[in-house]
Image (cartoon, grey):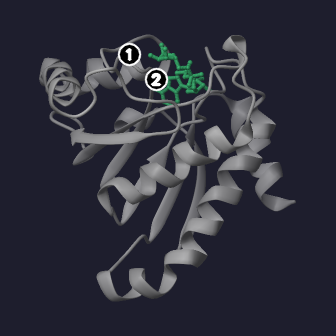
Amino acid sequence: MQIKIMHADITTRDVDAIVNAANSSLLGGGGVDGAIHRAAGPELLEACREVRRTKVPDGLPVGAAVVTPGFRLPARWVIHTVGPNRHAGQTDPALLASCFRESLITVGARSVAFPAISAGIYGWDAREVAEVAFDAVGSFSSASSEGAARDGGLELVEFVLFSADTTAIFRSVLQS
Ligand code: AR6
């Protein structure tokens, strides 16, 4: 499995699945969530409403992930996950690690692009997000490498960062 880090808008990525840093309502928001809904079109909100109705009527718990189609996006799927909100006292890195792991399990995509989940409105430090992300993706990859090799499996994980600063932080954490 290859890991790539890039400074870009995640809505432009032509991968199997992009990950949305959503909130429990799944009904949209600001940040990357707003950008993904705008680029995917109104069908995405409809699909999210359907997921709420059929799978998570009380909202998507922190650390969980669900999938919808990508509609007008280049990506085939959008994986919606809810990161921990530091401003609400959610400081356990295990919750954030769960977002990365559950996102990879949800759809079994070969290529997945992640934003810096929780590093915006939810107030986590980008360095800590990068550390948790690489650790979670690395453990997922080594735990599933046998099964994955049989299925085609996960080949590419991209971290798509929206600012030059966050990109530099992710690069330096990966190198160390
Ligand atoms: N492509 C890639 N990264 C982006 C993009 C983009 N187009 N736009 C923003 N980012 P945030 P959170 C970066 O706030 O902290 C929403 O309202 C951004 O610079 O989007 O998990 C949800 O509905 C930051 O580094 O997500 C929730 O209510 C990173 O994406 C809440 O915000 C994450 O920032 C979730 O907060």
Residue 123, horizontal then vertical, whole percent: 70, 18
Residue 16 vs residue 23: left or right?
Answer: left
Q: Quadrant of residue 27?
A: top left
Nearest the camera: 12 or 35?
A: 35
Q: Residue at x 69, y 24 (%)?
A: 90
> Among all residues in the image, which is located at the extreme right?
176
Above or below: residue 50 compared with residue 30: below
Name the residue beneath numbered marker 2: 32
Q: Residue at x 49, y 77 (%)?
A: 144
- What quarter of the picture does the C terminus occupy? bottom right
Ligand 1 closer than 8 Å to label 1 CB: yes
Nearest the camera: 115 or 124?
A: 124
Above or below: residue 2 compared with residue 4: below
* Label 2 neighbour load within 10 Å: few <14, some 14-19, many 20+: many
Residue 33, horizontal then vertical, whole percent: 41, 21
Q: What element does badge 2 sit on?
A: helix
Residue 19 vs residue 165: left or right?
Answer: left
Residue 25, horizontal then vertical, whole percent: 35, 16
Give the distance between the C-alpha atoms of the residues marked 1 and 2, in whole angstroms. 5 Å
Ligand 1 closer than 8 Å to label 2 CB: yes
- Proximity of marks 1 and 2: CB atoms separated by less than 8 Å: yes
Identified by mark 2, the residue type is: Val
Number of marks in picture: 2
Identified by mark 1, the residue type is: Gly
Name the residue beneath numbered marker 1: 34
Above or below: residue 73 compared with residue 75: above
Q: What element does badge 1 sit on?
A: helix
Above or below: residue 112 compared with residue 156: above
Q: Residue at x 36, y 33 (%)?
A: 11
